[in-house]
Image: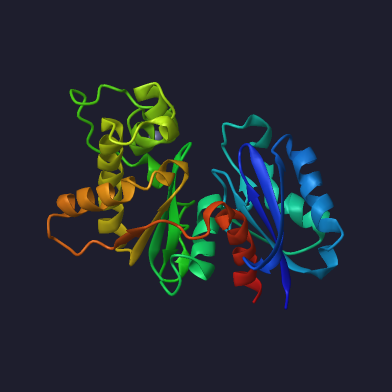
Amino acid sequence: MAVFGGIEAGGTKFVCAIGAGPEDVEIIEFPTTTPAETVERAAAFFRGRADGLAAIGIGSFGPVDLDPQSPTCGYITDTPKELWRHFDFAGAIRSVTGRPVVFDTDVNAAAFAEHRWGAARGLDTFLYITVGTGIGGGGLANGKPMHGRMHPEMGHVRIPHDLAADPYPGACPYHGDCLEGLACGPAMEARWGVRAENLPEGHQGWALEAHYLALGLVNWICTVSPQRVVLGGGVMRRGVLYPMIRNQAAALIHGYLDPPDIVPPSLGERAGVLGAIALAQSEFR
Ligand code: ZN
C-alpha cells in the first residue's frame, strides 16, 4: 500500500506524519519557528523515507494562495506572522523532499480527513467548522474542497450583535464584532475574565456562545446546503454546546427547511495531520 506524508502547519506548532490512515501512522510535532528552521525539521523527518512517499499533503494556517493559475500558488500570503509572510511553503517542501506536494488550508485538510475516515464519510457537500483561537470553516461542495478566489473565511461573517445585551466590542483586529470576534475562545475569555474551559457549566456565557454560533451556522446552512455540519475545535470540547446550538439553529430556521445534523468530529486532535495525508492521497490515488 502506498505511504504518504502529511504536514499540519499551525501558527504555534507543526505536526508531521507518515502513513496511510488512522490505523497506520507515525506522528511527530515541534514548535513553529522560522520558515527555514521549521521546514528543515519537517524535511529531516521525511528524509529517511522520502523515496517511499508517493506524495506529501500540507494543511496550512493562512491565508494561503490556492489558485493553480497564480504565480504564488502554494504560498502563505498576508499572515500576521511576519516571518512567514509571502513564503513559498509548498515549493520549499517540494524542493527539500523531491516529492509531489498537495497544498490546502488547515481547515480543508481536517475536513478531508473527516470525509475519508470520520464524521462526514459518504457525503459530498458538508461543512467543517472549528471554534478555538479563531473560527475557521471549510468542507466539500459537490465532492471538491471549497476554494474559489482564495478559500472560505467563514469566521468573519457579520451577525446581529445586541450591544445592550452584550457590550463586549469583539476581538477581531479587522472587524471587531464579526462572528470570530464575538465567539472565538479569546473573545469568551476577554468577556468573562476566565478561559472558556474554566467557565462553569450553566454560566450565561454558554448560552450566548451557542446563540452566536447558531447565527453563523444558519447563514452557512442557507448558503451551502450542507448534508451535515461537523463542528469542532477547543471551545466545542464543552459538549453542552451541541444541544444548545441545535435548538437555537432550529429556532432561527423556524421551519423553513429541515436543518442538517450538527455533529462533533470523530478524529479529534489528529484530524488536521490525517487530513494532510488524505489530501495527498486524493490527488495521487
Ligand atoms: Zn473578523
**One can see residue 187 in this view:** no
Position of residue 12 in the picture relative to residue 205 (left or right): right
Position of residue 143 in the picture relative to residue 72 (left or right): left
Position of residue 268 in the picture relative to residue 220 (left or right): right
Residue 167 is situated, as x and y percent measured from the top left of the image, at 25, 21
Q: Nearer the viewer, residue 234 or 39?
A: 234
Ligand 1 quarter of the rendering: top left
**One can see residue 8 in this view:** yes
Position of residue 278 in the picture relative to residue 246 (left or right): right
Direction front: furthest residue: 201
Residue 279 is situated, as x and y percent measured from the top left of the image, at 60, 64
- Give the residue displayed 72% in from the left and 42% down from the top: 30
Colour convention of the picture: rainbow
Q: Quadrant of residue 102?
A: bottom right
Q: Is residue 229 above or below residue 165?
A: below
Residue 247 is situated, as x and y percent measured from the top left of the image, at 21, 51
Total numbered circles: 0
Direction left: furthest residue: 255
Q: Nearer the viewer, residue 26 or 259?
A: 26
Q: Quadrant of residue 278?
A: bottom right
- Give the residue displayed 68% in from the left and 32% down from the top: 83
Tell me the quarter of the image containing the C terminus: bottom right
Q: Is residue 183 above or below residue 91?
A: above
- Give the residue displayed 18% in from the left and 23% down from the top: 164
- Give the residue displayed 37% in from the left and 48% down from the top: 239
Direction right: furthest residue: 48
Residue 140 is situated, as x and y percent measured from the top left of the image, at 44, 64
Q: Nearer the viewer, residue 249 or 62?
A: 249
Q: Is residue 272 above or below residue 135?
A: below
Tell me the quarter of the image containing the N terminus: bottom right
